[in-house]
Amino acid sequence: TVAGKKPVKGLAFGAIAAQPMEQDAFVVPEGYAWSPIIRWGDPILPSGRAFDPAQQTPEQQARQFGYNCDYLDILPEGPRHIRSMVETRRGTKGVLVANHEYTNPDIMFDASYDAATRRAIERAAHGMSVVEVTRDKTGTPWEYSRIAPLNRRIHLGTEFTIDGPAAGDDLLKTIDDPTGTKVFGTLNNCAGGTTPWGTVVSGEENFHGYLRVNGQDARDARYGLRNTATRYGWELDDPRFDGNNPGYENENRRFGWVVEMDPYDPTAAPVKHTALGRFKHEGANVILAADKRAVVYMGDDERFDYVYKFVSTDRMREGNSAGARAHNKTLLSSGDLYVARFDGDSPASEIDGSGAVPSDGAFDGTGEWLPLVLDGESQVDGMSLAEVLVFTRVAADTVGATKMDRPEDVEPNPFTGRIYVACTNNSNRARDGYPGVDEANPRGSNRDGHVVEIIEDGGDQTASTFTWNLLIVAGDPEVNDSTYFSGFPADKVSPISCPDNVAFDADGNLWISTDGQPSSIQKSDGLFKVTLDGAERGRVEQFLAVPRSAETCGPVVDVRDSMAYVNVQHPGDDGSWGAQTSYFPDYLADGETVPAGAWRGPRPSTVQVFPAGAGQ
Ligand code: FEO
Ligand code: CA
Ligand code: CA
Ligand code: CA
């Protein structure tokens, strides 16, 4: 229990065993049950039809829950002024918000669809969903509302506003948008966060996979953008996805942002915030500083990329009045942007790449938030403010930031303000031709990842310096002697690898969902509780496991309801083009077979876990 907080009844469970990666099952602890709340293809808007794999169209998909759900939250029914959703009790009505990161065309369709139709459906399956949910009483499973006022789909056809210091800059103008302030669509929306003013922010991550560039600007290569055909092939349908087409040279620069969406106002255009910089945004998480400025922590999910912090110029206004909400929705439009440098306090000779803990007993040290933008001015020699924001990776390269092992979710604990960075893995660390180890990334060929804990100096979220330590150096302790759990005995933890998303419960515990355990430790991915305080600090307990080839995303843990929620992403897609390995969540009954020529694939879904028997 966090000091000063009244103990609340926790989510009681006995850790499940690590599950074999071949298993096509969703596994929860004894005493719990699960069900999908909503699945890919379930209709959420008027004239949306029930999912029919033989009759799918782009128009239908735009009225249905999208594919590969990632970020997830269930917000209160009306806008709330909230310090954190963790502290807000969910009632009997809620608003489910989910990201739809990407598509798996090889297992989404039967052979009857032509390529152009498939691609149009895929564009409609990207983006975000807002869906109202209801239940009879708290602590029981939800049902989604088929038609409801707040239900909304955001996809590649949705108009966004571009705001902040780079909006309107020449770098963002195209022939379709000479103002550089409007763009259709969002894509590869990975993790995200719910803001204290009741909006949702979402990271546009691997945008390079969708946009072809003309190869004329070396800065594009820093983002993996290339002058070659894209995997998705959308440039075959719409000229804007190919920067070789005159007038569309800058289209790619209109992606790679943090977007903000107001789930309580279905008519409000979502916004791309240039003030938060452009990189492969895993997500964004907001906490208020003592003076009510909004502080946003962000990771750039690429091997050897960085951790960032944004501090808003203005302060959050209290209350839910229209004026306060309108003001608060401008907080991410102006502020200071920093990138993190981590300095270890142990001799470099003790950081040998093996993962052996240095003689001072911890991977730890101090750090500094290096300014990229302050008071509306670039802090980077030779780069304008707009250039720093549009080519943020290039800017960060010049100031001495620390290259991390794929920083994914970066989230402050709402009770303590300490920040947790999930570094998922980095197979290239210290390999020939790549950067070596450092105390914050201490393992060569880091297959299992680690979690960094950052403590801002003086407990001030706006501080420019901090201390840090590695909370977990992940892996399966039975086969890997370089694991570390803050001193907690490694033989008493659940094996964990490839931490991706993090979340907190009302007891102040950390929850981690994983992406990549099948390839690193040959176990199904899952959701894990990590104790942060007291003698059990570092104790990892597995709560659930997801089906074959799936990733666990967007965890929400509500200890007051004894419920947890996850998005099950890419079930059945093992990456080997066309191979399908799961029927989740509509499993075949015993003896049931799929008729020849019929499609029966897996459906990425939002799942709720609840006490067995609840609501029955
Ligand atoms: Fe979309 Fe970094 O995971
Ligand atoms: Ca140390
Ligand atoms: Ca992720
Ligand atoms: Ca998170």
Image: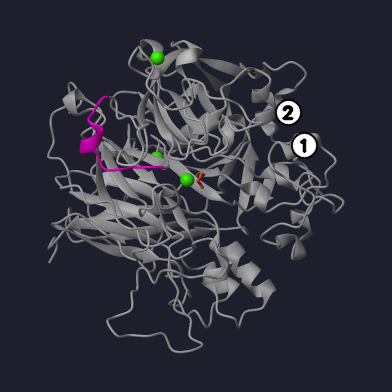
Determine whether 296 is above or below 172 in the image.
above
In terms of secondary structure, where does tag 2 sit?
Answer: helix
Mark 2 near mark 1, Cβ–Cβ under 8 Å?
A: yes
Kindly tell me whether residue 150 is visible in this rendering.
Answer: no
Q: What percent of the width, then of the height, locates residue 492?
A: 20, 37
* Residue 292 in magenta stretch: no
| Main SS category, magenta section | loop
Observer-nearest of 582 and 337: 582
Q: Which residue is mark 2?
A: 387
Which of the 4 image quadrants contains residue 568? bottom left
- The three-letter amino acid code for the residue at tag 1 is Leu
Identify the residue at horizontal 13%, vertical 60% (top origin): 614
> Is 209 placed left or right of 237 in the picture?
left
Kindly tell me whether residue 11 is visible in this rendering.
Answer: yes
Instruction: Please state, as top left, top right, bottom left or bottom right, where the C terminus lies in the image.
Output: bottom left
Q: What percent of the width, then of the height, locates residue 419?
A: 39, 26
Q: Which residue is mark 1?
A: 171
Determine whether 149 is above or below 168 in the image.
below
Marking on residue 294: none
Observer-nearest of 592 and 283: 592
Question: Nearer the N terminus, badge 2 or badge 1?
Answer: 1
Observer-nearest of 161 and 218: 218
Q: Which range is magenta? A: 487-497
> Is 406 placed left or right of 139 in the picture?
right
Mark 1 residue crowding within 10 angstroms, few (<14) / some (14–19) / many (20+): some
